[in-house]
Image: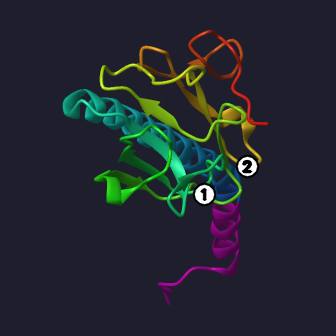
Amino acid sequence: MKSNGFTLIETLIATAILIILTAVGIPSMIDLLIKMRVDNEINHINRLLILTRNTALNTSQTVTLCPLKGNICENNWQLPLTVFTDANNNKVYEPLLQEKLIQYKKAIVEGDKLQYGNTRKGLTYAPDGYLKGWGQNATFSYCPKGHLKKSRAVTVAVSGRTYKSEFNQKKGHDVTRSGKAIKCN
């Protein structure tokens, strides 16, 4: 008499193979998900910077990118980021002065870190597309919690142009345009 089922040994072997494949595959999948999250955030920040600069150029106004708390720019880059016209360049969103909200970006993943300089509250572009004010050129560093080798960055030059970090094969991690490692304090 012929049976159409599996034997206990066949089931145990198939289960063992499945467990081994899962144990090998899950860490690679987690690494891929973290890399995708970091790449997505860096690309989004880069697009926000380009939007901020282009808005300043196209409207002939000063435009600010910053984390707003209420209507005031804060030095907490984990907050949602906002792009707005900043008529008096004071890093305060004031709709009564006809300042306009251009774009809003959700906060980053809790536990990850986004840093722009050490003390900077915001970044403002002048109507000519250059950064407005002394010392605004710096690097936006995005560091995922527990996976610092997967950190990425966007450097903003005085000219207002942006440069994303690139993977350095020898060092095994991304470096900035000047070859420096990406750090979040």
Instruction: Please say if 56 is above or below 172.
Output: below
Image height of 64 relative to 173, above or below: below
Where residue 60 sits in the image (x, y, percent)?
24, 29
* Residue occupying the far left of the picture: 58
Q: Is disc 2 in contact with disc 1, using a CB cutoff of under 8 Å?
A: yes
What residue range appears in magenta?
Answer: 1-19
Q: Is residue 76 left or right of residue 47?
A: right
Counting other residues with Cα less than 10 Å from the Cα at mark 1, is it few (<14), some (14-19), or many (20 or more)? some
Q: Is residue 142 magenta?
A: no
Check if residue 9 falls in the magenta segment.
Answer: yes
Three-letter amino acid code at the position of disc 2: Lys
Drawn side of residue 3 relative to residue 147, left or right: left
Q: CA distance from mark 2 to mark 1?
A: 9 Å
Identify the residue at image location x=57%, y=54%: 108
The residue depicted at 48 percent of the width and 59 percent of the height is 106
Q: Amino acid at mark 1?
A: Val
**Residue 102, horizontal then vertical, whole percent:** 31, 50
Residue drawn 36% across the image and 41% down it:
87
Hey, which quadrant is residue 160 in on the image? top left
Prevailing secondary structure class for the magenta stretch in the rendered image: helix
**Residue located 32% across and 37% down the image:** 51
According to the image, label 2 marks what residue? Answer: 145
